[in-house]
Amino acid sequence: MAELIDGKKISTDIKDELKEEVSKLKAEGREVTLAVILVGDDPASAVYVKNKKKACEYIGIKSLSYELPAETTEDELLELIEKLNGDDTVNGILVQLPLPRHIDEKKVIRTISPKKDVDGFHPENVGALLIGEPGFVSCTPAGIIELLKRSNVEIEGKECVVIGRSNIVGKPMGVLLLRENGTVTIAHSRTKNLKEICKRADILVAAVGKPKMITAEYIKEGAVVIDVGIHRMDNGKLCGDVDLDDVESHVSKITPVPGGVGPMTIAMLMYNCIASVRG
Ligand code: NAD
């Protein structure tokens, strides 16, 4: 039977460690402050923002909330970001994506100071990751590395296959696994023989965005599987990109959905906020 990797427990451990770190910073007279900007009224984004603010509260990070109407212009948003960039009391700036269509996301990401870019989306941070220099790392893939390490999964020398090449999950995931000395393949929508490639994986990361697409046919016996996908099914329950029931008897360890990768993303955001103060 597969071992379920408990992302909820591991993320709580991390948040408790960070809580201590924040207390130490406070004792040195340093406060950690995250500015969270939400534009519009997308219900899923509102939930994500609420959870991020709740995590800040738990850890002792001060969160400044900017909830702007959907009609906010690009210039107004950029002006707010510039103001926060120049505010020495603000350590991290997070703009919840997606943004309304009339706002250029790339421009917004580039406007956030790389030193306050706790999401790790700014090209300067992405470039730093690629060449192995310090910088903020995208939270979901960073959280997956923590999940693997804290579950005693060795990455060095292992065949790692990532399905998905998005800028926020697939690509940084591939680079991070490479940094841990994995042998990495990034598969995507144009990949041929996807099943054969996935079957090589000792560690398979599914970030494909297709509910339950990954079945036992894609999995090598004993592989470790990380399921990044989150989908709401017709019955209201959540599922991932992996068909857990089908693969469970084939894998050695797997992350469930919910309670796997999801909670780690927020824990790593909190980690980045604190790193932004430590410098
Ligand atoms: P995306 O849509 O930007 O990227 C999906 C990737 O999958 C693309 O690179 C595409 O090439 C690849 N792909 C699509 N169909 C494919 C196919 N049939 N075969 C092989 N590759 C295929 O998505 P994303 O932002 O990277 O997110 C992926 C999933 O992870 C989504 O379900 C998303 O909701 C979820 N997600 C979860 C978290 C979390 O915190 N748990 C964070 C981010 C994303």
Image: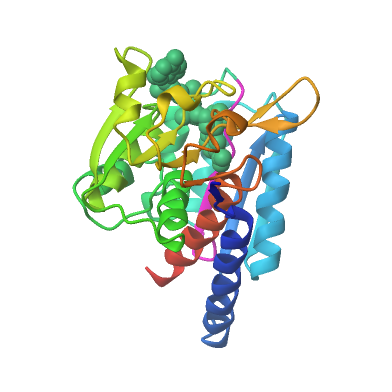
| Residue 96 falls within the magenta-colored stretch | yes
Q: Residue at x 51, y 37 (%)?
A: 227
Residue 75 in view (yes/no): no
The answer to whether 12 is drawn above or below residue 212 in the figure is: below
Q: Residue at x 30, y 39 (%)?
A: 160
Seen from this angle, which residue lies furthest bottom? 27
Tell me the quarter of the picture where residue 17 sits. Answer: bottom right
Tell me the quarter of the picture where residue 127 sits. Answer: top left
Q: Nearer the viewer, residue 261 or 155?
A: 155
Q: Nearer the viewer, residue 184 or 86?
A: 184
The answer to whether 194 is drawn above or below residue 67 in the figure is: above
Span shown in magenta: 87-100
Q: How many marks?
A: 0
Q: Taking 154 as reference, is 262 left or right? A: right
Tell me the quarter of the picture where residue 164 sits. Answer: top left
Q: Taking 39 as reference, is 250 left or right? A: left
Residue 33, percent across and down? 58, 63
Residue 42, percent across and down? 72, 28
Residue 263 in view (yes/no): yes
Residue 223, percent across and down? 39, 41
Q: Nearer the viewer, residue 5 or 217?
A: 217
Residue 267, percent across and down? 56, 57
Q: Is most of the magenta stretch helix, strand or loop?
A: loop
Q: Residue at x 73, y 23 (%)?
A: 233
The quadrant of the picture occupied by the C terminus is: bottom left
| Residue 11 falls within the magenta-colored stretch | no
